[in-house]
Amino acid sequence: MISGHYVKPPSTGARFWLRRLFPFLRWWNFIGWDTLRSDLLAGLTGAVIVLPQGVAFAMIAGLPPEYGLYTAIITPVVAALFGSSLHLISGPTTAISIVVFSSISSLAQPGSEEYIRLVLTLTFMAGVYQLTFGLARLGTLVNFVSHSVVVGFTSGAAILIATSQLKHVLGLNLPSGHDFVVVWLHIFGKLHQINLYVLAVAAVTLIFAVFFRATIPRWPGMLFAMIIGSVLCVFINGSQHGITLVGQMPDRLPPLSLPDFSFETIRELAPKALAVALLGLIEALSIGRSIAAKSHQSIDGNQEFIGQGLSNIIGSFLSSYAGSGSFTRSGINYQAGAITPFSAVFSALLLSLILLLIAPLTAYLPIAAMGGIILLVAYNLIDVHHILTIIRTSREETAVLMVTFLATLFLDLEFAIYAGVLLSLVLYLNRTAHPRIANMVPNNDAAGPLLIETEAECPYLKVIRIDGPLFFGAVNHVSEYLHNIDKSLMRKRNVLILGCGINFIDVAGAELLAQEAQRRRAQRGGLYLCEFQPEAYGVLKRGRYLENIGEENIFATQKEAISKIIPEADENICRYCKNPVFKECGSK
Amino acid sequence: MSIITISRGSYSRGKEVAEKLARALNYECISREIILETSEQFNIPELKLIRAIHDAPTILDRFTSGKERFIAFFRATLLTYLQRDNIVFHGLGSHFFLQQFPHVMKVRISANIEDRVREEMLRENIPADEARMVLVNDDTQRRQWGLQIFGQDSWNAHLYDMILHIGNLNVDQAVSIILHALEQPCFKSTPDSRRMLDDKALAARVEAALVKAFPKVIADAGNGEVFVNVRGSLAEQKNITEKVTLLAEKVDGVKSIQVNIVPFIYED
């Protein structure tokens, strides 16, 4: 038991490794009756939401509907207990289902026993890939998915989710599988066909969900709203007016299964499984990170990879097909007040119970009510506060956000992430390739720093400070700046570089300094360095660049450098100087 | 102007030491009174409260948080009571509850097991073996309680300013030693120590007001400004903040409330 009045010492040895092996032990002590209650309520809402989704996704994957539910029972439990995110709900997803179908449908008849066995093998192999990536610690790659990418992706996905539900909310018969624009064109073209009964059920469910969230936020308002939507559907005799119902579910728990381990099958499925594995990881990590942006949790990419891998491996032996993180269900889970991954466990247990006990009742649940709820979830996924902050703060980050957002809407989901990450990296590299170079002169205020940034400068000595790494990417920019010093004032042949802002120098950067020193000496000038950090100085020393620069031109402090350089300044230049900036100028 | 806590095992004659000390100082001597007052103030059965302060928590307690609730109530009553100053408090894990107050003198009284067995046999009219078993079980429960609630062994000498063994030393001599030690300035109440006690008492009362709804609540206070940490989902931040404020603002002495939601804690 943890008391609030003392801090447990950090674990060492066996306990540390036990917690590494079973990551749920790290948050085990955080559990109490209050967290269990919150998780139970969130799990209940999640169980009801996943019921029709599981069926729909299994059908997309070309599997019998119960396989979607089996995946919604097994996968989230393993992924939650062995993953890193506290709120990520894994299970069947649209994207993975589509990839599974396109991968296996060419090898066997969808829905057949052969097809199911191949899908389970694909699931097992995808899990092995994911587990291997996690153990190889490739999860750190997730750090390259910036916050702006996540916010853009989340907002785009929210609109996609909402768009996908409009046919259920409006009662329109839209062709499935089309992209965002085509779906909206179809909607506008069929506005006159809107089924008002369907719309009424969806709207009433949505209104009550909003109302319950505002008034009794700790209760499963979404569940209540769905019940109200179902009652309304019965009251208006919905099935007679074109309201589609979820339908009765099979009442059976996930049976044991065995993937096909024959060499031929494994060889054939290996590349397809890799695609499923990568898509699953990108989906799960992106969603985990977007939820973490709200919950302030830090995601361990490696652990998440391991969790996803184990869930697919174990799932393949319990009739579950490849799963990943679900945006909708994770969003609902978080918004319903889930605190620990136990919400996923409760959701799975309750789904099993629903399957066994009240499967016939699900026959009365209208899909329109589900659509209304999912619209609310999609709306809540759009983080307006963060979007506005990003827009106000940085144009570059705004560009990343917009590119990811638009790519999510108009391109493939996984490509949207790639596009955002790629643009983030390009902008980052561009930023580091252009380190800030500041012109410095002595400060007249004795209380302040010795040198300050200003426009004024000495005609004999240019003092600059480089803020950023001096590496191969930045060499061109810095070299150009050093050449431009001569362009603007032909007689200035001496440059002092303050190196306190240079945290890293590579061989290209060191060579630039050596060449610049030689060039300036050839012009009867000199390059001086001062206040270089030990790491940067070490590179110059080890590479013997100091021989070219001249050890006598290296100074520990600015004061030392200026007091040595200025007294040796050219009398002719100083005589006509109208702007003596150094205190040493007076003595000349 | 001092506060002295006396920790002891059953039949270690700690109670006698406490009572004689209180008489010598003309201080109030309390122990069970805090239980009664807590029971009355928070409307909880006395027996449940005694068990919460005495018995080690079970696995079930972790999920029900019953013990934590009773302990929070007890702590609030105790600290509020101690604001009166000039008190000798004995038993009931006193040293744990007052560990953070340097000016409170913490004394441990121990005694030979055979002496304790004899005392137990006399009082309860039971054979020696049974008496010994009762005492050993009792001591074990107390140690487990301390370890599980506060992470500290009540036999750890670092918890006390002074440990006196009643054997060669009799009760009067023990009282005399404590009285002598009390002359030291570090055991005198000062304006700073009183302010510290006031702040901690206010924080404890806020914790007691919130613990039913938020079992892992941790409150801190300074001059009426209360900082409350409760666990919960950040998705529920607004509602949790409102609920905490509503409950905490009823506590006497609260001027303002800051709520911090702790969404998770990882242990490495």
Image (cartoon, coloured by chain):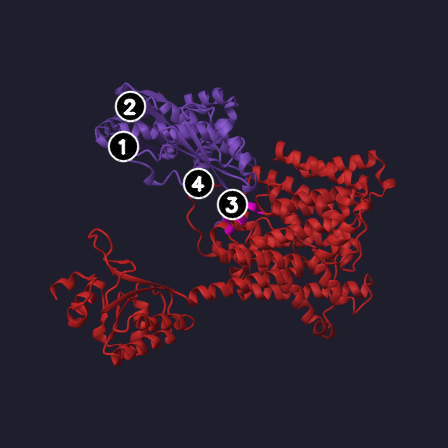
Chain colours: A red, B purple
**Nearest to N terminus: mark 3 or mark 2:** 2
Labelled disc at residue B201: none
State the residue position of label 4.
B147
**Residue A462 in picture, x, y percent from top left:** 26, 67
Chain at tag 3 = B
**Magenta region: which residues?**
A383-391
CA gap, disc 1 and disc 4: 30 Å
Q: Main secondary structure of the magenta part?
A: helix
The reply to the same-chain question for discs 1 and 4 is: yes
**Nearest to N terminus: mark 4 or mark 3:** 4
The reply to the same-chain question for discs 2 and 1 is: yes
**Nearest to N terminus: mark 4 or mark 2:** 2
> Quadrant of residue B196 in the image?
top left
Q: In this rendering, would A555 be left or right of A238?
A: left
| Local secondary structure at mark 1 | loop
For disc 4, the neighbor class at 10 Å (few under 14, some 14 to 19, many from 20) is some
